[in-house]
Image (tube, rainbow, N blue to C red):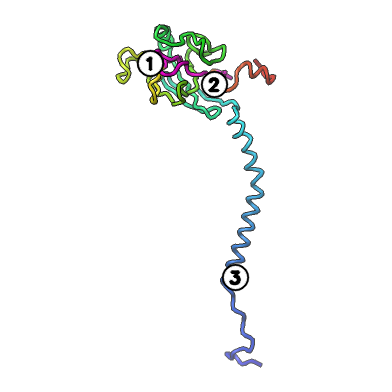
Amino acid sequence: MTEVGAITDHPQPEIDESRRKFLTAATGATAALGAVIAAVPFVESWTPSERARALGAPVEIDLSKLQTGQMITPTWRRQVIYVVKRDQKMVDALKNNDGRLKDAESKDSTQPSYAKNGMRSRRADVLVLVGICTHLGCLPKQFFDAGDPVLGADWPGGFRCPCHGSRFDLAGRVFQGSPASTNLVIPPYSFSNENTLVVGLDDSAKTKTGGAA
């Protein structure tokens, strides 16, 4: 019989702290790996939409807060799209540029048939362009104010490329003397309602997919 306070003949085993920490970490890592594996289908479910956007899925743009003289720059097919809100004064002034342009009637430029007009648009108040200079691919800057001091008193308003100086009016038409030879490209687009622009989807695409024209 062991006396109180006496040293026992069978000492208690010491706890190996380093081994316990290792086992705890290993268990946690296994659980984390399981969580990652379980999450893979969820993450992959995002992939088709991202791939679809890159391949050209339509992009909806809310125009309700776009003010006259403002521009927003969404992306479609990894390209910057310029969406400009014009007033009637801007549109009426476009005809004054015709004698100064390389392709005033857009005969040698790229746009859908519904945008092959003086406004180069479906609606007078909304201009939609691919925001890439047709010279060497830079992004033209907006200079919408007529007579802008940077561009001179005869400047009617539009865009200027910062790389090589190509100039375009508020219909994306290129001015004579610019390195760019053609007007800015207009992508396919439509309006699902008064304030929603859909870039990448127009009547021809709707017809091909069986949608409403």
Tell me the residue that label 1 is attached to: 157
Q: Secondary structure at mark 2?
A: strand
Residue at image position (54%, 17%) is 194
Figure quadrant of the C terminus? top right
Location of residue 159 with respect to 43 vertically, above or below = above
Q: Please report the bounds of the magenta region as a residue range.
A: 168-193
Tell me the residue that label 2 is attached to: 197
Tell me the residue that label 3 is attached to: 19
Looking at the image, tell me whether mark 2 or mark 1 is earlier in sequence order: 1
Q: Secondary structure at mark 3?
A: helix
Residue at image position (42%, 22%) is 70
Q: Amino acid at mark 1?
A: Gly
**Of circles 3 and 2, which is in front?**
3
On the image, the x and y values in percent for residue 2 come to 64, 92
Q: Could you tell me how far apart the alpha carbons at marks 3 and 1 are, in whole angstroms?
A: 74 Å
Location of residue 143 with respect to 35 vertically, above or below = above
